[in-house]
Amino acid sequence: MNWESILTQTFSQGFGTQAVVFALAAIGLNIHFGYTGLLNFGQVGYMAAGAYGLGMTVYWLDQSFWLGIVMGIIYCLVLTLVLGIPTLRLRADYLGIATIAASESIRLFVRSRGQRTRTGASEGINDFADPFFDLNIFNKPGSQSYRFFYWEYRAGDLWVMLIGWTVVALCLLITWQLMRSPWGRVLKAIREDEDAARALGKNAYAYKLQALALGGVIGGLAGMFQVIRTQSVQPDTFNPTITFMIWAVLIIGGVARIWSPVVGAMIFWAAISGLEAFLRELIRSDWELFGDTIGVHAERFLNLTVQNVSQVKFMVFGMTLMLLMRFRPQGIFGSREEMALDDR
Amino acid sequence: MIVGAIVVIFAFFSLTAEVFAQDAGQSIIGQLRADDADGNKQPVVGVTLTVDGVGDGVSDEEGKWEIPVDSAGTYTISIDPSTLPEGISLKDADRASLDVLVEANKDKRALFSLVSGDAPVEEKTSGGVSTRRVAQLTVEGLKQGLYLAMAAIGLSLIFGTTGLVNFAHAELVTWGQLCTFLFNAYGFAGFIGWLAPLPPPFGDGVNLIVAAIFGMVGGALMGYFLDRFMFRRFRKRGLSLIAQMVITIGLSIFMRYIFVYNFGGSPRSFKDYSAQTAWTIWKVDITPKDFAAMVISLAALLAVGFLLNFTRIGKAMRAVADNRDLAESSGIDVNRVISVVWLAGGALAALGGVFFGLDQIKWDFGFRILLLIFAAVTLGGLGTAYGALIGALVTGLVINLATLWIDVELKNMIAMLVMVLILMFRPQGILGQPERIG
Amino acid sequence: MTDNSNDADFVPGITAGGGGAGAATDIEHHNPIEGVFDDVAWEVGVAKPDPILKATKVSRKFGGLTAVDVDYLEVQRGSITALIGPNGAGKTTFFNLLTGFDEPTTGSVSLNGETIDKVPSHKLASKGMVRTFQLTKALSKLTVVENMKLGAKDQPGESMFKALFSPLWKGREDAVEQQAREVLDRFNMTHMAEEFAGTLSGGQRKLVEMARAIMTDPELVMLDEPMAGVNPALTQSLLGLVKQLRSEGRTVIFVEHDMDVVRDISDWVVVMAEGKIIAEGPPESIGENQAVVDAYLGSHHDEDLEFDEDGNTTTETGEATFSVNAKTDSEVSE
């Protein structure tokens, strides 16, 4: 077993560009669900809105990348209105179904052939983020890779990470400030009991719309980083499973805690990548870890191949989500008392 | 408990792996594309292709299609020109059928060249309104609606009796489909590899009709199992409904990837009735198997209606859905009723899965119709059985008839838009009662 | 208790209630509207000298069922008005209609002469109306003092953009905190200010909910079953608090099942049955009203309803029979 390569995968991914994307998306979801109690199962729709707002500006409108960022935010705000106005008066579970349906609608729409000139349909939009990478301070002649201990990144990824974690820090700061303010107190009151908040004169609908917009825009930023890091906007990147992964990230870290999206994203990606690297290494080395007798049987019994490693990854993900909800709904580091997920 | 349950499922499935390891298989594959107005290649979606004596397949959103065949040999593959979108035709009309030689464990690519007229892309996909098309699409819509209803009723009743929105319900549909496929192709040996030497139904496949009954039993058992060993315990522990809902999401992902791990990613079809010539009744083409499936599903749905209205357990179900506490205090064994709901819901979903599977069997089939099921259930009113039925029929009809005007790719989107509209203006659904406050 | 509470023109200001009042129960509360009802006839829909709230032809239908059908009702300013009736009489539904939590099928409601039945519920707080709920809505994951602060008006920090900059709301926040502590002190709850509301007993939550309502500085307080599930000791202090509200010049409307409570604190009683108002009058008039007796007997054949010489209903336990069923479905505290 090549443990070094497994550890490198684990540590690198734990802080890598994927973790940035999921941390941001989960910060948004935390504002929605953790603080306001909005059951949003369509966070990936916001990611798509941000990503396509950026991509379409460059590809279809032929405008600059930087204007695209602004457009991405505007797309998210528009989506908030389209999504929020009809659904925010609904009961939580209806809202959940409506949001997942909306996010799937977005995916089906942008990948349809009729939109090819605007969204690139199923082929998507590629190589649109050059202006971002032109500013990369890590570019150097020769080798484009950096390594410190177990962390190994390409120059481009390092640049995305630098900007990405900075944006994450900024979003955390904003969330922290807002949630200690009277505005955040009203959100929490709405989460606990909307009627009580209304009886005290709080316009619950307006607050929910504001929270949806804020969390949505942060989700949109996540979508932008997702497409910037790969230089490619692909409609099928934005499928419902991504939303569920964001939920897992949030639950791992602990719902309604400021740091949970970051902690959750790091643990989630480290674990997922570590597991995958471990399994691949296991296959490559012919189950060396378990010795000849067990290894050979296990190999035949489990029928694990290079092709289905990623399926095992998702099985473990699904199971982890179940076990977490059952045994530690407050998250890995959360305490039961202040858990916001309880009696709802 | 939950861990034990999962280990059991996993072990159970691991056994099947060997069966499939032997015939990882061979398929005839291909991709249908045609030039659009700008001269770019565009996928051609929804075209039916048939391998004589084996089965048929439909080209997907990327124009790709795949028909698995059991063994190496020469096969005749033909494309059904009537299913080509308007404005697209075969380049060489004589080459609608091809003979291909398939080698063991190797996919064989078959090439059909398509050409398109000058019509712009937007118009090519929707074929214009004709009586024939309307009639055909109405029947398609009813068909899809009836099958959807089978899945939707279970989801709706589970919600009605427990308040749980079960995201894993779609996997019960897939599970029924796959169970039936296994019985149809391998008999019990499909589940427990070492039974293979025995005669049918143990070591070899059985007729699809018998297999479908096994599949329903499998679906019912899975439904019962999920309730008994997972959700009943969660209810007892007072786990919140949202937590339970997230658990069903995890369960859905878990089951789906168990399926693909064991059954592979390629679509399959049942051994029997796969290649049938369609009857033409008035202006509508319908295959005998679809006709039979529609009749059976109608009968099954009527049976459910009878069960709910006239039997003790059916009345108890409605009582629990109406007011759980009241039902409990009037002596109804609520847990038993919920078990029956899961059991029946699992069996119905499985049967729906079998009918959908007459076209194609795939590991993520259920998940791909999950949102249609949700649309059906919310449309009709969450928690009511009849609502789910009506909602499913409306959903089926709307999305199929919508293709008269819009792109086929967008038809599922229409279902979701209709759902959001219903939620806006009548959140209790078509049949639901407005709630009394206080 | 304080000077400005005697003032007929109500002067807003919670602090008027006074900190350090100790147990509210010990205080004899002055009734500022003593004698106002002397000239008011004991009949349904009667006009009051100075009505704060009027409901005209208010009805609410659910499908085919008419839950509420009230022809006319006025509520006297500064009074404590009880709304009673057997289970299913439509009291809570009527309450929801009055407080904007439900919209009447027909009819209108006015507060201080202003029509409010189309006004969303959250705007009513600024018009001086606040309500509590039958099932207590203490916000469990917020501390008691946070619960209090929610009631405060004019907090600029409740706007999303101002919330980003602490200096814009810190000053008001400190004032609100001060006010919250004073109210808590008055409710004898200072010691639990930092506790999560979810950890309190049912009765204490009722107190929190009521105190929170007071924080909005209301003119009209609507209490939906304030005594349900509250233990007897706490009931007394709750009653004291309600009377104190009146002596501060606020109007109180409450739904109640317990006749002892109704007799003890209300100035005027409105009786509902099957969605209609069937009787109005001072508490002592209700027991002798034939329509009321019929309504209660009609809905509880199996229970006795007895009257003592004052015309009050009694049972062996000294509690009115119609409270029996009501208590089972509300939470019971220690």
Image (tube, coloured by chain):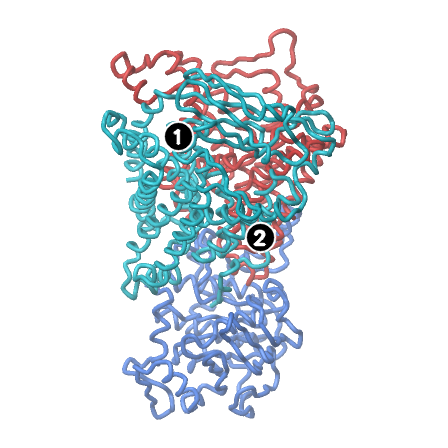
Disc 1: which residue: A316
Quadrant in the rendering for residue B124: top right
Q: Badge 2 local density, few (<14 within 10 Å), some, or many (20+)?
A: many
Which labelled disc corresponds to residue B414?
none
Secondary structure state at the residue bearing disc 1: helix
Q: Which residue type carries mark 1? A: Val
**Which chain shows up in cyan?**
B
At 56% from the left and 83% from the top, the residue drawn is: C71
Residue C209 vertical placement versus C141 (above, below): below
**Which chain shows up in red?**
A
Chain under callout 2? A
Q: Is residue B205 visible?
A: yes
Could you say where residue B42 lies in the image, as x and y percent from the top left? 65, 28
Disc 2: which residue: A88
Which of these two is toward me, A39 or C220?
A: A39
Which of these two is toward me, B398 or C84?
A: B398
Chain under callout 1? A
**Which chain shows up in blue?**
C
Secondary structure state at the residue bearing disc 2: loop
Which of these two is toward me, C64 or C122?
A: C64
Q: Badge 1 local density, few (<14 within 10 Å), some, or many (20+)?
A: some
Q: Which residue type carries mark 2? A: Leu
